Structures are given as C-alpha cells and as structure tokens.
Image (spheres, helix red, strand yellow):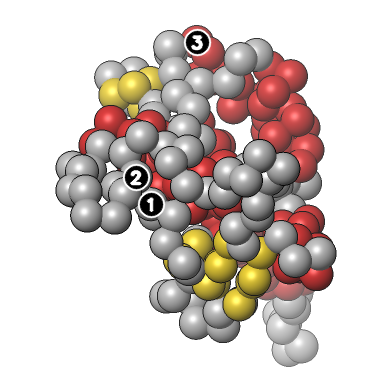
Amino acid sequence: MALFQLWNYHRFRKSFHVNREDVMKLAKIGSKSTYHRCVKELNHYKYLIYVPSHNPFKGSKIKMLIFGTSSGQVVGQAVYQGVPNQGQAVGRSNKHIQTLQNSYKLPQPKNENEVLEFFKKQKWPEQEAKKFFNHYQSIGWKIGGKIKIEDWHASAKNWLLKSEELQNEKRVSQNIASDERSERNAQNLHTVRNKDYNQPL
C-alpha cells in the first residue's frame, strides 16, 4: 500500500524511483532486512518490477504492474481524481503532496509504551526511553521549551546520540583521572638510592 501511495503520488507513471527510508516510514517497517524481503517477494510474485539501486543518491526503480478486473476495469487508472486523463490538463494537488510528505511525521507519541516499543525496535536502552519520554512530556514536547517537535522519532535519535557522546566524554575523563592517580602514586613510591637519612623529613 505504501508503494501504491507513492505510485499515486507520481501520477501512475510507468516507473518511478523510491527512497527506502520514505517507503519504510510509510509502510511502518522498522527493519531494512524486512523491507528488502518484502520488496523482493513482491517482485518475485510479479506484483511489481523492482530494480535496486547501488547509488546512495539515486533511489531504487519501481515499475508497478497494471491488473485487469472481472468487470474489465483497469487497476491504476482514475483511482485518484487528480490524475489527468489523456489530453486533459489538471493542476498539481499541493494538499495531497503535503499530506503524503507529513503522513509519517509524528509530533509526539501517544504514550510511554509507544516510546518504549520504538526504542526496543532500534535496540536502544529501555532506561533511555523512559528518560526521553519523561523529559519531553514535562516540557510539552518542545525543543528548548519553545519550538514544537515535528518528528519525535528524529528527536529520539538525537537524544540517543547526545547520550552516547556524554557517556564517551565521561569515560575519557575517568581514564584521564585514573592515569593521573597512577602517575601520582608512582611518584610517591619513587625513592632516591643515595638518600641521606640524617636529613630531617
């Protein structure tokens, strides 16, 4: 259905390019392996033709196949009123495009369980999920308490990146402190061979 929606968006062209991340968000697929398996199966069973792209700047090519029905209608034609028939000029529906672009952007989660589930799928710590939810819940899901969050998934990713940076900085500072302690201990244990014991301490 996500691919059909994108095909609709591209006005039922014979073929069109797709971005894997966009399709995964529209289809609510969290795993790349699941995405590739599904697309390959659709290709195998002749629902579409999938031409993968190895260029990161160019999406994979999809060619949707048109099926006939028992009534003689053709699936993929006149499904969306904004699709022009031959010889008919119809303007682009900006509202439809905006809806498609924002269909997977979520300003905030429904509840804490949704956050926990999202972190679990990404294999992130559960403790960080609770911290993330409690923090943004307390400030009304705003960045810096001022700007409303447009996509909480992206905010969660940034949260984890910052958490990892803080942990790395903490480890580095702990290692430096440990090295300094070891150096001080070594200096304290260092004795002079020709020490004059007649000198007062």
Residue wearing tag 2: 83
Which residue corresponds to the image point at 58% horizontal and 20% vertical from the top-left?
Answer: 109
Q: Position of residue 145 (x, y in %)?
A: 34, 18
| Foreground label between 3 and 1 | 1
Q: Which of marks 1 and 2 is nearer the N terminus?
A: 1
Which residue corresponds to the image point at 47% horizontal and 67% vertical from the top-left?
Answer: 14
Which residue corresponds to the image point at 29% horizontal and 55% vertical from the top-left?
Answer: 86
Residue wearing tag 3: 138
Q: Earlier in the sequence, mark 3 or mark 2?
A: 2
Q: Which of marks 3 and 1 is nearer the N terminus?
A: 1
Q: Position of residue 1 (x, y in %)?
A: 63, 43
Q: Which of 36 and 129 is in front in this view?
A: 36
Number of callouts: 3
Q: Nearer the viewer, residue 108 or 53?
A: 53
Picture quadrant of residue 45: bottom right
Q: Which of 78 and 152 is in front in this view?
A: 78
